[in-house]
Image (cartoon, rainbow, N blue to C red):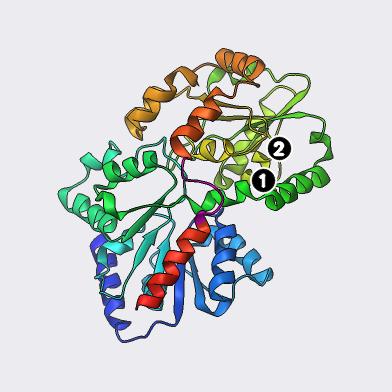
Amino acid sequence: MKKIYLLLVRLARLAFGAKKAQYQVAYFMSFAGNETFIRELVKQFGSDEVLIVYKTNVKENVLQLRQGHIIKHAIEFKKFQVTSFVKGIKLARVTLFDNYYPELSAINKTKKDYFIQVWHANGAIKAFGWEDPNTYHRSVEDQQRFQRVYDSFDQIVVGSEKMADVFQRSWHVASDKIDRIGYPRTDKYFEESWIGKARKKIQTKLPELTQKRVILYAPTYRKNVSFSLPDDWRKIKVPQDAVLIVRLHPHLANVERQIVDASPDRVIMVDHFISTQELLCVADTLITDYSSIAFDFSLLDNARSVIFFTYDLEEFERTVGIQASFKAAFLNQMVNTVEQLNDAILFGNSDKNVIHKLNQQWNTLNDGHSSARLIKQVKERCTDE
């Protein structure tokens, strides 16, 4: 099935071979959270020069961009719909991707193609690529296919030297492919108007949180793995002056409800019309495990503490893998039991050592102007053709 699908990608590429680029930029979107960059992209190039090629899971986000008159041109890329994928690449001078797209292994790039990887995470705790333990259990043919995708990118944008090292190890790419200009998704965390708007939205919709200390629990999404908390979760203790918001991946909304129902007082869920990124703007403590959300949160002035609740660390290392350097740096900040978590919540709310450490290692190039630098490069690339 895989071979047939990739063959169809090659055939579709040939079918579009004679078509001329109609757009300056195509942005392949599989994750929400980079809308600020997309707005700036349209502002600089014009709405007629930007094409969004999106996966079904972000359809609602694209609809909002349309309704806000931010974008005009968008193509939905459904699973196995190779024509949309190839069309998006062929019709643009420069193509940006926010994820690993396996279809790229079947794209025979021409000199006119220019691919930029903007990824969907500011840093990395989880292993991926060649550092994922599962990669070595795949066939040689699969491994070669993975590497063709990694090699297809002309630029990989990062917000730190630390993340540059991760990509070089995980994707086996040369250092000169890494674009050390800052990570566009972090720009909004430097934008006072966006932060203020997020806080006002929450204050209006959830006024009961205004006088509370907000603790946000946002664990990573475990693909193809059911999410379950440890048996002693019922012993979680939320201080009287606080509220703990459980925020899981949208696909796990039913699990989110189950967790809250099985929790003691002051553990709540919030409707997803308020995004996780917006919730970060009012939280003083973030509890996560292996999610890159920690790197984003640490940029905000309201951030007081990050707690890594890694109750399944041994299993996660075996099945998914985590970055060895991250574990070495933050092992002492990882808590494995609810009892330890309770202590961290109670006594660690004003400890900014972890925040400082995260910024010092993972946010060194992020200053609120990453989008502008990337767009300048994209413009130069379009002009050179």
Name the outermost residue toward the left. Answer: 140
Relative to 179, does residue 241 appear above or below in the rendering?
above
CA gap, disc 2 to disc 1?
Answer: 8 Å
Q: Residues within 10 Å of mark 2 (few under 14, many from 20)?
A: many
Q: Which mark is residue 278?
A: 1
Q: Which residue is mark 2?
A: 282
> What's the residue type where badge 1 is placed?
Glu
Q: Position of residue 258 (x, y in %)?
A: 63, 33
The residue located at (66%, 16%) in the rendering is 346
The residue located at (71%, 37%) in the rendering is 282
> Would you say 153 lies left or right of 50 here?
left
Q: Find residue 209 and report its image quarter.
A: top right
Looking at the rendering, the stretch of residues picked out in magenta corresponds to: 364-370
> What's the residue type where badge 2 is placed?
Val
Q: Is residue 322 magenta?
A: no
Secondary-structure class at tag 2: loop
Q: Which mark is residue 9?
A: none
